[in-house]
Image (cartoon, helix red, strand yellow):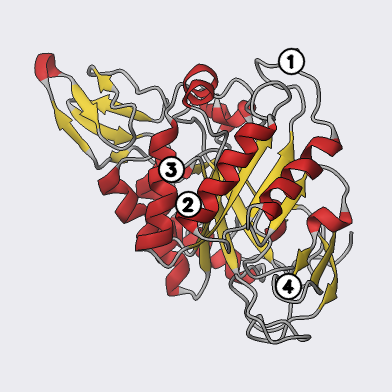
Amino acid sequence: MNQAYRPQAVLGRYWHEIEDGRIQCDLCPRYCKIKDGQRGLCFVRANIGGKMGLTTYGRSSGFCVDPIEKKPLNQFLPGTPILSFGTAGCNLTCKFCQNYDISKSRAFDKLADQASPEMIADAAAQLGCKSVAFTYNDPVIFLEYAVEVAKACHARGIKTVAVTAGYICDEPRVEFYNHMDAANVDLKCFTEDFYYRLCSGHLQNVLETLQYLKHETDVWFETTTLIIPGENDSEGELEEMTQWVVENLGPDVPMHFSAFHPDWKMMEHPRTPPETLIKARQIAIKNGVRYAYVGNVHNKEGDSTYCHNCGDLVIGRDWYELSTWKLDGEGKCQSCGTQCGGVFDGPPGDWGRKRRPVKLRPSQPPPSRAQ
């Protein structure tokens, strides 16, 4: 690691010149047209002298060792710690954003930590993390940095995880996911009205990302839907969404239904009742989703994983703590031998619910086991 590493803007990919000296960003379906000295909506991609510059390369809003289940990923290396970090900005404008202090940041003082790709990979190895997560804000907008970090991680045998809204164009989508081992994709709702009105985006682009991941990559992925009362919680919408997932992605893609709390520009909306999440999970299971979970509430049944063949509890969870484990080393149910969907590497980890902020330095101590 190089402690003296200093980041700077780097030349971004996926753009072209247009009229009047502007450039068009072709990274995501917003297609921002940017004058010299201006930034796109995401705030981190800018026209610098007629070329696209990524202004947050090597800069982070902070590093933290989290449980993998917090991403959430319940069936990717369960129980293991994951080194998580993000930058600033976002290419959607979700009025309910629960990381708005980072994703909506317009001040670079949020980017307190600096790290080269090699520093991040080295830190993950020294901290005993099997994977690194690009999270807190959407890694799509810092694609060039994420890809280089992923390359450095893979050289050290460390896997990479994208926590993303999946709002990306076709060509960069191929490059981005070529370097990811797993992803959690926000499927925010199942109506165009919601995406356009509350996120200034479009549903179809996200569905295309999900289909690409399923049919053209080996990336393990799970979806998360934040259930907002009065917006995307109707039984009809949940029926349509879960049926689409089974028909287009198959029954093995885990779906997480998480509770909304008032935040950012939707302070007037009430919290999601736990009963709504339980109902969403029941609808998903009824429609053939084999692994459906509830999030942001305490619900052992809704947190746990069951064999889709014999119904036995194969991974017990209490928040992020693992209890029951009835899978063999390959992820097969010990009761009936049925393969559980996911990525498993021997016995589960025991990281639990700990969350440990870290500063990247040339030498990291081993992670504490204290709660």
Q: Residues within 10 Å of mark 3 (few under 14, many from 20)?
A: some
How many angstroms separate mark 2 from mark 3 (CA)? 42 Å
Single out the mark in the foreground, 4 or 1. 4
Disc 4 from disc 1: Cα separation: 39 Å
Crowding around mark 2 (Cα neighbors within 10 Å: few <14, some 14 to 19, many 20+) is few
Tell me which numbered mark, 2 or 3, is placed earlier along the sequence.
2
Q: Quadrant of residue 150?
A: bottom left
CA distance separating discs 3 and 4? 27 Å
Determine which residue is flagged by label 2: 4
* Distance between mark 1 and mark 2 Cα atoms: 42 Å
Badge 1 or badge 3: first in the primary sequence: 3
- Can you say whether 133 is above or below 88 in the image? below
Residue lying farthest left?
Answer: 19
For label 4, the crowd category at 10 Å Cα-Cα, with few meaning under 14, some 14 to 19 and many 20 or more, is many
Looking at the rendered structure, the kind of residue marked 1 is Met
Q: Position of residue 148 (x, y in %)?
A: 38, 57
Q: Nearer the viewer, residue 58 or 271?
A: 271
**Is residue 304 left or right of 206 when viewed as pictured?**
right
**Circle 4 residue:** 307
Q: Which residue is mark 3?
A: 207
User: According to the image, label 1 marks what residue?
Assistant: 267
